[in-house]
Image (tube, grey):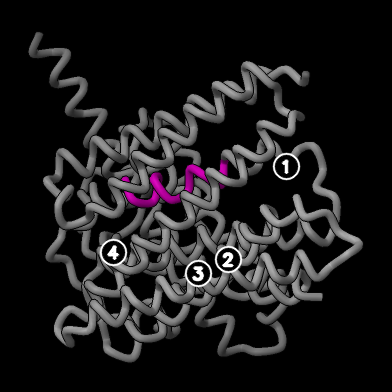
Amino acid sequence: MASLGPVDYALLFAGFGVHLFCLACLVKKGSVRRYFTLVLYLCSSIAAGVGRCLILNTAGFNSNNYFYFYFYSDALLIICLYFILMSLYSFVFEEMDVSNQVRAGAMFLLAGTAGISYYMITKSADRLVTRFVIELAQNMYFVGVVLTYLLWGAMVKLRENRTRVMQLVLSMGVYVSLFATSFALGNLHQMPSIARYYYPLMDMWLPASWIYTFLHVPEDARMATARVVAPTQ
Amino acid sequence: MIAALIFLVSVATLLQFFVSYSRSVIVASRRHELSEEACEICGFTAQTVAGDKFGRLLQLISLCPEPGVDSLEVRAVALYFRLLDAARLMLGVGIPSAATWIESERSGCAYAAAVVLDRRIAYSRSMLEHQAGR
């Protein structure tokens, strides 16, 4: 059973701290109702963190229990990320009244991703079916990248100017791209042992960027999308 | 094959999202007017900050107590600044118009760092006042 070092514990507690602080910021700013999906993600992430901690202490870092719990809890967190994306889509398209179509499309995509991932794994006789969890995470993050990219494209086209929405979408884009890159790299090559420190750091990006957005960017702040996309002199 | 494709596309989108995010942080910081005190300490005018001052501003920022909410902003902008430095090395000589743009972006990064410093100076001052009031 691999034991955790001081760096692992420091990262673990830092992760909890950032998530809890972000939750406190959302509550303090009175944004719980409007940004309910963010609260749902934060609570799920904290619960997954507690579960991972318990399994680490009982079964160890290299155990199958931890492996499966990590990836399946990650899949649930990605579903929460999809909910956030859906709410961001509905913010951007709220004047067009297409939220039902957006919801149906996202659910269809989610089910499709899981189905295609399972089909790909079962068709590969030389690979273990247990690799399904890793492939699923990689594919789900990649679908997240595509959905975020489409949303950002739509925002640029529609000249969306709410700074808060822009920053939430862009930070989400960074997060899902970062994880899709890491999982794809993990599938291509064996990840070095130092990667165990890298994932908790990446996990902190989303709540940390939300803290910045909710503390420094007022709800009514506006910014031209062109200033973010195109080079300015 | 699919993993390689996902890797390439994700790296490209990561770069694009990160640059846009950093630019949004820089543009948002432009709304903040620097205090006279911060300008005096750093030796620049309130409107423009040269990109070359960025390193010094980071050193000053690290000397001030942190309110606990802007370290991500500083790191994201510092990483963007390094990307710009790398782009300046690669493109600056060949494409002069890129050099002008890169310099204006570096200046934006320095302004964002100055805003963080300004905020930290104000925070330190309020802490001192709070302690003196006890």
Do the dots labelled 2 and 1 sit on one chain? Answer: yes
Mark 3 sits on what residue? A111
The chain that hosts pointer 3 is: A
Q: Position of residue A21 (x, y in %)?
A: 31, 34
Residue at (85% x, 50% y) in the render: A190
Task: Name the mark on residue B28.
Answer: 4
Mark 2 sits on what residue? A114
Residue at (56% x, 63% y) in the render: A141
Q: Position of residue A66 (x, y in %)?
A: 66, 32
- Between A208 and A78, the residue placed more toward the observer is A78
Residue at (76% x, 29% y) in the render: A62
Mark 1 sits on what residue? A195
Name the dominant secondary structure of the magenta segment: helix
Q: CA distance from mark 2 to mark 4?
A: 39 Å
Q: CA distance from mark 2 to mark 1?
A: 25 Å
Dot placed on the residue nearer the N-terminal end, 2 or 1: 2
Q: Is residue A36 magenta?
A: no
The chain that hosts pointer 4 is: B
Q: Residues within 10 Å of mark 4 (few under 14, many from 20)?
A: some
SS under mark 1: helix
Question: Horizontal placement of A96 versus B30: left or right?
Answer: left
- Specify the amino acid type for callout 2: Ala
Segment colored magenta? A201-211
- Between A84 and A133, the residue placed more toward the observer is A133
